[in-house]
Image (tube, rainbow, N blue to C red):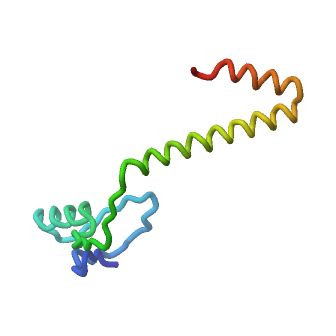
Amino acid sequence: MAIVLDGTVYSAPVIRERIGDGHCSITGGFTTAEAQDLAIALRSGSLATPVALLEERSVGSTLGQASIRQGLASGTLGALLVMGFICFYYGVAGVTACAMLGFNLPS
């Protein structure tokens, strides 16, 4: 097994035991500087890749307002449908429960 980052082989350790708990140690004839370089390479992950901008879009504030309005409308419709089902299924007890829920709504 080798530790390869962006096409560069940083280390090729020999696997001596199963990596069971997600932790392992790499042993060998490293100098302190080589061990620190390997640790930095492993912590940093893949090296930076150039970013290519493929598309850019701008949206106005009205899109957010429309989303809020649609969310409130769908929430209200959903609540009314659930309350209607409760009234239908439970009868008088459902009507009472929905009325009490209505009293507890914020003004």
Tell me: 62 left or right of 69: left
Q: Residue at x 36, y 52 (%)?
A: 60
Q: Residue at x 32, y 76 (%)?
A: 14
In front: 49, or 81?
81
In the rendered image, the vertical position of residue 26 relative to residue 83, given as above or below:
below
Q: Residue at x 33, y 59 (%)?
A: 58
In the rendering, at what x and y percent does residue 2 appear? 30, 78
In the rendering, at what x and y percent does residue 85 appear? 81, 38
In the rendered image, the vertical position of residue 40 relative to residue 66, given as above or below:
below
Image-quadrant location for residue 32:
bottom left
Q: Which residue in the rendered view is the most extreme toward the bottom? A: 7
Tell me: 80 left or right of 87: left
Image-quadrant location for residue 24:
bottom left
In the rendering, at what x and y percent does residue 87 appear? 83, 31
Quarter of the image with the C terminus in it: top right
In the rendering, at what x and y percent does residue 86 appear? 81, 33
Quarter of the image with the N terminus in it: bottom left
Q: Residue at x 21, y 62 (%)?
A: 39
